[in-house]
Image: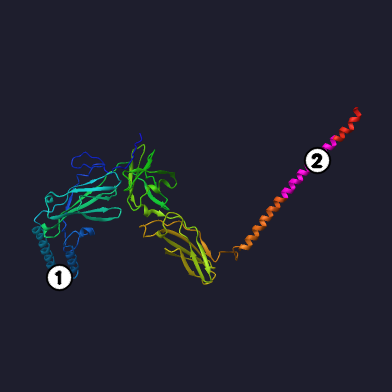
Amino acid sequence: MTEVNRPCLSCFKKSDSAGGAVHTEQNPIAGWSPQSEHTSRVVCAHTESIPKEEHSISPLQDTCDLLNHMEDRMTTSGTLLWMCLVLFVLLTQHTSHSIDVAGLSVDPPANIRITDPGHLGYLKIEWNIPSSLQNLTDCTVRYQLRFYSTYAERWMSVRTVRLSYEAQFDLEKPIQLRMLTLVKGACTNDTEVLGEEVELVHTPEHTGVVGSRIRDFHCVYLNKEYMDCMWKAGSVNPPGSKHYLYYWHRDMPETAECPEYIPPSEFGIGCRFPKQSLLEFSEFNICVNGSSTEGALKPAFFSLEVQNKVKPARVSDLELLVENELVQVQWSPPAGKVPEQCLEYNLEGTTESTDGSKWQWTNVTEDTTIDFLWNGGSQTTCFRVRSKVNDYCADEGFWSDWSDSVCFPEITVEGRNYEPWNDLALTSILIIIIVAVLIFCLMLLMLSKMCVNRKEQKQAFTLYQEKVHKAFLSPVFH
């Protein structure tokens, strides 16, 4: 029986076990095991190998960095011990000062949870104000949220007074959050007090045939007219396998299935998105799952930005203008929907000498003309150009296909140059061809008339013979 695995609406597997319930669509993730980590973690002799953002949390980090720098200059163990004692006093004074001034307990946010609305990785993080700060009126309570972005491969940080935040996550990798509370105002003598930081980690679970996750997924936005996303089946491809693609961006109320599937070929399986289904400068989330006779295929999740996948059309009108020793290479922007101001060009030149040696160079520019000086030698240089969206309009993109090459001087064959005919020669040849066609037509017309006349003469002669025959036989019978 084929198991149908349709929309990738949720990344979380249902669980009824107590204390470990992980909820699906529209339900929060609960039952995480928070790992406390004090924000004032400092090592005197050597700083621990932890992410840079974690260092920024400590209010004494600048002092620690200074002491660590000074440590490198110290040569006696007694001086190093003295510096450690100074740091201990400073840290103790700061902690006692915060407690004395604040006179309150700054607890971490309460009831931290994540809601998965089925947007293929765009999750909502929610929390509540700590119970110890609910009746606080003369101070501002803010929250610092840090989460690890596996797409950017770094920690992202935000501070907010709100009780929720939305962010993009890779549903095939662990979700890591770190949160703390900040209090500042009259109740703390305008000193910002940082509470304890808690860490929450959750690893989404996905079912499916082992090895059935798709491979080599990639998308290309061709000339900003349509986007093709292609992939290949997994290393394990069970009998009766069928793939489904679902996508979402922020202008869509819910996920939708691929508008137009591309039939399987040597290039793989694919989906074509028309321009009206795309949204630039936004998370464009994709999930590819599937079904087979052996069960569901493992889902694969991707998040991209459409403007970073553009491949412009091919430049088709590259030409050379030569005046004395100046050679100007010029071209026009490729046809299509990519704005001219968003394009940069890669001009490639290949020079060949009479002895067969070659060398190549490239020039990246946003202009559509480049000038060169020609030394009048026997060298031949060929040019070709391609285009790509520049850094002002996208973070990345694809180079277009190369244009046809144009060369200067013209490439020789058997020592003779191919030179273009001038206008007079072309006009003369055209006139000769027209005259030859007219003469041929006239000859056909005359031949046709001759055939008609000959036929008429033959018919007249036949009638004459019949009359003579009748006239000769008529007296005999009478």
Q: Is residue 407 left or right of residue 458?
A: left
Residue 43 sits in which quadrant? bottom left
The x, y position of residue 290, in whole percent, is 35, 41
Report the front residue among 283 and 410.
Answer: 283
Q: Is residue 437 left or right of residue 166?
A: right
Q: Is residue 408 magenta?
A: no
Q: Are marks 2 and 1 in contact (CB under 8 Å)?
A: no
SS state under label 1? loop
Q: Which mark is residue 458?
A: 2
In the image, residue 79 sits, relative to residue 340, either above or below, namely below
Part of the protein shown in magenta: 443-466
Whether residue 367 appears in this view of the structure is yes
Q: Main secondary structure of the magenta part?
A: helix
User: Nearer the viewer's eye, disc 2 or disc 1?
Assistant: 2
The residue wearing badge 1 is: 76
> Label 1 sits on what residue type?
Thr
Residue 184 sits in which quadrant? bottom left
Q: CA distance from mark 2 to mark 1?
A: 135 Å
